[in-house]
Amino acid sequence: TTRGTGGIIGNAQAGCDVRNVRVAGSNSDTEVEIGGIVSELGKIVQCAGGVVGQVNNGIKGSTYNFDDITVENAKMKAKEGAGGLAGTIATGINVDCSNIVISNVESGETYSGGLVGTIKSPGAALMASNIKVQNCTFAGDACSAISGDGKGAFRLSNVLVYKNKYQVT
């Protein structure tokens, strides 16, 4: 199994501050593909995200901030945890994100979401403001415009969810 496949960072373990980033195909016919159910090496892929595959709890007190991020014309696939921003948020982590646009993204398999695929524990939290998730397709056992699975806390404000498709398999 391989964990953490992302457009910018595979597995963030000591915090990150990501600002003014765009991960995108050139148009809706040319897409960025991140992850896959089985990698070229034959390993199962878990945690695929447009910016970061897995936000991990490597160092106590680490901060994770995302601001002014656009992910568009992209496909995220993972056996568990595929999201437009991050595939998985692990135990005991707070993630702050603002001014995020997820557009024309396909996310699939188990736990797929517009912002995150899954939040792994009650001790984790996603604080999100000024979020737009539009023209996306989410598929899998649990899927949503924000998070496919959420064991942690969500604090959301000013969120627009527009023209998305949901396919539960």
Image (cartoon, rainbow, N blue to C red):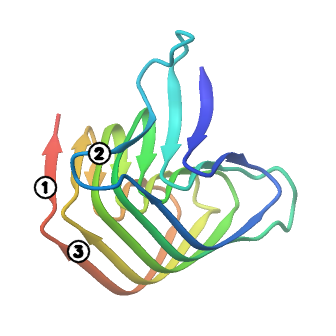
Q: Quadrant of the N terminus?
A: top right
- Residue 35 position (above or below residue 74): above
Amino acid of disc 3 = Val
Residue 96: percent from the left, percent from the top?
A: 60, 76
Q: Which mark is residue 165?
A: 1
> Counting residues from the N terminus, which is met first, the one under dot 1 or under dot 2?
2
Between the C-alphas of marks 1 and 3, the distance is 11 Å
Q: Which mark is residue 30?
A: 2
> Counting residues from the N terminus, which is met first, the one under dot 2 or under dot 3?
2
Q: Which mark is residue 161?
A: 3
- Residue 34 position (above or below residue 97): above
- The mark closer to the camera, 2 or 3, is 2
For label 1, the crowd category at 10 Å Cα-Cα, with few meaning under 14, some 14 to 19 and many 20 or more, is some
Q: Residue at x 87, y 56 (%)?
A: 59
Amino acid of disc 1 = Lys
Residue 73: percent from the left, percent from the top?
A: 31, 54
* In contact (CB < 8 Å): disc 2 and disc 3: no
Q: Nearer the viewer, residue 122 or 11?
A: 11
* In contact (CB < 8 Å): disc 1 and disc 3: no
